[in-house]
Image: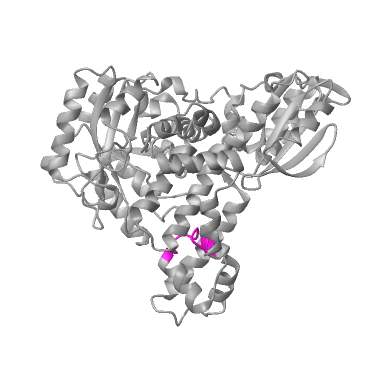
């Protein structure tokens, strides 16, 4: 987890520099470096040992030295010096959505507010009303943002939880005392956010395992230390991790029970009662006789139903579908032929198109769409008309030699009135056009819905990117009429994106399931700005699977020829 620790330090530096009003490029350098480290496949200590830190995107000589210092000492002198000049609470206040550095500075200098708690109290007491630039709507947004922070404190995004779980699993599964080891809970169900991590093991000699678990480097606090169950708080974001020993002949029952969800377990228990059975974490029983429990498949077979994948266990009709043999054959990574949302150096990506093409080859994809930002989004290096044609020529040249087909794409802005910020003469040059809202998030439900439905009706638009605009811990989904958008998407053969970027995962699984019922097609895009982010396709697939999608629902599962037919329609 050292990667995440270094990334956290760099992000904290970026926030302090923003509060100090430092150069924006310097701030972004730390943010880009943190992003690179979040997505780095190898442990940062290993990369440093090879002398390859400067090969990481966004890491130059100065940041490489800072990383070495963090690895060696566990802290960074430069951050300590910055923090001495800045109250700790101000950095936390910067995490409140819609609260920028200028406002945080004003609140501190004029009202001596230096913590989220003091800010919430001041808003509720009406003390912000006399500050210049603070309106009633601003106060509402601040309280809503504080609520998001509190909510985020109890749950973590799935990619973070996966990294924490992997660290523990990698440390434990090498122990010869362990016979079986599996993650359970909401992480196994691949929910987009996770409260805590449950790990189950079988072992004839669990004491050494429990002793090692509570003394691992990632442990911040020991909550319980027993021979059959131990609980700890991890150093990273205070995430709780529970390790539990179960009997081998009850492992399947325990895995089923602790995977959940609670609603799924209740429905299964109700079904068991109707059959004169009892199901719990130890097995399935008729009276005192144990009928099943060693594997989950044994239990599902006993109930005469198909195996239900963990992602579907939410009591949304999966039990009835399993009994009737009507569960969907969920999409898998092997079904994916390409990625529809990748940014290059032409806008705000860190890699060239040629570098992206070579990396995509390692994924065994047939194609990738390079969808850089359009001219309106200048903050993200949106492309002018001249830059568009330069990019198109480069793609044409690379395609002559590349094993992967590069699709010329663009991520266009949906304007406030539902228009597109490129003319038709430019739009028709692209293979793929994805449209997105990047501004005006606080418009009314009617306005936002109309913008998206209008974009669907543009004959050149193929995909609506991150349709609800959510950013985990930063911005709630904006208020839209999902039924209207589904109708417009279906009627105009426009796919809705499942954005795989960990902080987005937008659409949500519930919206995906709803849109599928309306006959909508979907496109998965990693929204990658650097090469390691291409791996997040798996997170988007988790959303797709939780939304009951099969490969026929997703245009990424079309081979290149079929895809081009679909796009041209």
Task: Say whether residue 287 is visible.
Answer: yes
450 up-or-down from 351: above or below: below
Q: Determine which quarter of the picture holds residue 441.
A: bottom left
Rendering colour mode: one colour
90 up-or-down from 199: above or below: below
Q: Residue at x 44, y 38 (%)?
A: 36
442 up-or-down from 58: above or below: below
Residue 107, horizontal then vertical, whole percent: 48, 73
Residue 130, horizontal then vertical, whole percent: 45, 82
Task: Say whether residue 191 is visible.
Answer: no
In this rendering, position of residue 457 left or right of residue 146: left
In this rendered view, identify the residue nearer to me: 321 or 24. Answer: 24
Q: Quadrant of the C terminus?
A: top left
Q: Residue at x 75, y 24 (%)?
A: 251
The boundaries of the magenta stretch are 90-101
* Count of numbered tags: 0
Residue 58, horizontal then vertical, whole percent: 38, 40
In this rendered view, identify the residue nearer to me: 167 or 457. Answer: 167
In this rendering, position of residue 551 left or right of residue 257: left
In this rendering, position of residue 394 left or right of residue 263: left
Q: Quadrant of the N terminus?
A: top right
């Amino acid at each position: 987890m050292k990667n995440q620790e270094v990334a956290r330090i760099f992000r904290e530096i970026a926030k302090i520099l923003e509060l100090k009003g430092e150069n924006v490029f310097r701030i972004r350098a730390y943010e880009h470096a943190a992003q690179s480290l979040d997505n780095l496949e190898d442990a940062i200590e290993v990369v440093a040992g090879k002398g390859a830190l400067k090969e990481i995107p966004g890491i130059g000589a100065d940041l490489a030295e800072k990383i070495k210092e963090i690895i060696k000492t566990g802290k960074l002198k430069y951050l300590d010096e910055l923090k001495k000049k800045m109250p700790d609470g101000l950095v936390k206040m910067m995490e409140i959505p819609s609260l920028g550095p200028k406002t945080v500075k004003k609140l501190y200098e004029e009202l001596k507010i230096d913590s989220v708690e003091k800010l919430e109290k001041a808003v509720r007491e009406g003390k912000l009303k006399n500050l210049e630039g603070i309106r009633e709507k601003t106060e509402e947004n601040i309280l809503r943002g504080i609520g998001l922070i509190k909510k985020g404190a109890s749950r973590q995004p799935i990619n973070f939880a996966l990294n924490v779980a992997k660290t523990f699993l990698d440390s434990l599964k090498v122990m010869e005392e362990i016979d079986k080891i599996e993650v359970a809970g909401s992480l196994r169900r691949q929910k987009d956010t996770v409260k805590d991590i449950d790990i189950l093991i079988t072992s004839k000699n669990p004491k050494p395992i429990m002793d090692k678990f509570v003394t691992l480097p990632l442990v911040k606090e020991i909550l319980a230390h027993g021979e059959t169950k131990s609980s700890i708080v991890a150093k990273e974001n205070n995430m709780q991790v529970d390790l539990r020993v179960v009997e081998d002949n009850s492992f399947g029952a325990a895995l089923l029970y602790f995977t959940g969800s609670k609603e799924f377990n209740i429905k299964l228990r109700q079904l068991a009662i109707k059959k004169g059975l009892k199901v719990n974490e130890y097995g399935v029983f008729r009276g005192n006789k144990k009928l099943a429990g060693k594997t989950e498949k044994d239990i599902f077979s006993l109930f005469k139903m198909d195996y239900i994948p963990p992602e579907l266990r939410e009591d949304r009709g999966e039990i009835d579908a399993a009994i009737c043999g009507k569960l969907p054959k969920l999409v898998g990574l092997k079904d994916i032929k390409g990625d529809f949302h990748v940014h290059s150096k032409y806008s705000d990506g860190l890699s060239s198109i040629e570098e992206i093409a070579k990396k995509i080859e390692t994924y065994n994809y047939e194609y990738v769409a390079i969808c850089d930002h359009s001219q309106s989004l200048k903050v993200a290096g949106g492309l002018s008309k001249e830059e568009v044609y330069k990019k198109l020529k480069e793609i044409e040249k690379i395609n002559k030699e590349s094993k992967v087909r590069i699709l010329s794409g663009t991520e266009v802005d949906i304007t406030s009135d539902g228009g597109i910020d490129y003319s038709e003469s430019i739009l028709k040059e692209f293979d793929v056009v994805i449209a997105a809202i990047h501004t005006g998030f606080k418009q009314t439900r009617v306005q936002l819905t109309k913008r998206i439905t209008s974009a669907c009706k543009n004959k050149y638009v193929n995909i609506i990117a991150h349709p609800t605009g959510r950013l985990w811990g930063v911005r709630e989904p904006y208020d839209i009429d999902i039924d209207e958008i589904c109708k417009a998407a279906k009627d105009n053969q426009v796919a809705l994106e499942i954005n795989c970027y960990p902080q987005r995962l937008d659409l949500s699984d519930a919206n995906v399931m709803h849109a599928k019922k309306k006959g909508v097609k979907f496109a998965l895009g990693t929204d990658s700005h650097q090469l390691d982010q291409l791996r997040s396709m798996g997170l988007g697939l988790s959303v797709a699977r939780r939304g009951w999608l099969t490969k026929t629902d997703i245009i990424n599962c079309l081979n290149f020829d079929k895809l081009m037919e679909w796009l041209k329609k």
